[in-house]
Image: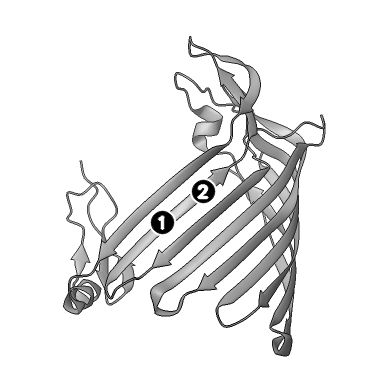
Amino acid sequence: RYAATTWRGGAILDLEEAGLRLRAGIGTGFRAPTIDQRFGISAFVTGNPDLRPERSRGYDIGADLRVSEALDLSATWFDIRSEDLIAFQGGTYANVARARARGVELEAVLRLGRFGSVSAGWTITRALDETTGERLLRRPEHMWSVSALLTPIERLTIAPALVFTGRSRDFVVTDSGGFGGVGTIRSGLLFHLSASYRLTEEALEEFLTVEWTVTPDANRVGYRYRGGELSFVEREQPA
């Protein structure tokens, strides 16, 4: 059983006439190892019962700029220092004594009026194991995305998204299924596309007012949904 107290504080300076907002924050974090990370057993991973909780302290400084009614820009610098970082170590999990992840997040949002909006983001991260000086595994240095929420006609919504993940270090899996040391995962590009069409205004209103209740024989916690609010209700656990 683990217990910890974490905290976060911040400050904002709003320069309304300039359309600029400056912000800064500092806080601590705590993450206990999961049951699977400590005791799980599978064909590829064995838990580590000696894992210690992960503790961290983070800082961030940023700025948000309203360029116009249609365009917002933001930038954030962050620095996170961790002790006993829980990391995958080729077939099991282990604590990294000291780790540090710092970088910059950039974002732009373009509003297209009734036609929707387009947003773009870019994150640059340098994540190091401070005991060895090597890059942490599974932490790509570059990630960027471009997404949109488009409404070309009334009731039709189209949501395309393009996501790029840069190269990162990770364990190499051999043809026999074992781990063969550390290698580099190539960068990749992923495209998402979804669309929806609301047939009638009444359909939306009905969804928000009808009572939804999971039946007692369902294998999840029962809940009720009404008027935009979610509340839990008692039910018997399935046999």
| Residue 81 seen in render | no
Q: For the residue marked with disc 2, what is the amino acid?
A: Val
Q: Which residue is mark 1?
A: 160
Q: Quadrant of the C terminus?
A: top left
Residue, x 65% and y 45% (percent of image)?
142
Q: Quadrant of the N terminus?
A: top right
Residue situated in front as seen by the camera: 83 or 23: 23
Give residue 230's position: percent from left, percent from top: 33, 68
Q: Which residue is mark 2?
A: 163
Residue sitting farthest toward the top: 176
Residue situated in front as seen by the camera: 185 or 146: 146
In this rendering, the answer to whether 48 lies above or below 210 is: above
| Residue 61 seen in render | yes
Give residue 155's position: percent from left, percent from top: 27, 73
Residue, x 17% and y 49% (percent of image)?
217
Q: Secondary structure at mark 1?
A: strand
Residue sitting farthest toward the bottom: 17
Residue situated in front as seen by the camera: 103 or 166: 166
Q: Quadrant of residue 25?
A: bottom right
Give residue 136's position: percent from left, percent from top: 70, 35
Asked whether, in this view, residue 32 is left or right of residue 39, the answer is right
Q: For the residue marked with disc 1, what is the amino acid?
A: Pro
Asked whether, in this view, residue 86 is left or right of residue 34, the answer is right
In this rendering, the answer to whether 189 lies above or below 229 is: above
In this rendering, the answer to whether 69 lies above or below 40 is: below
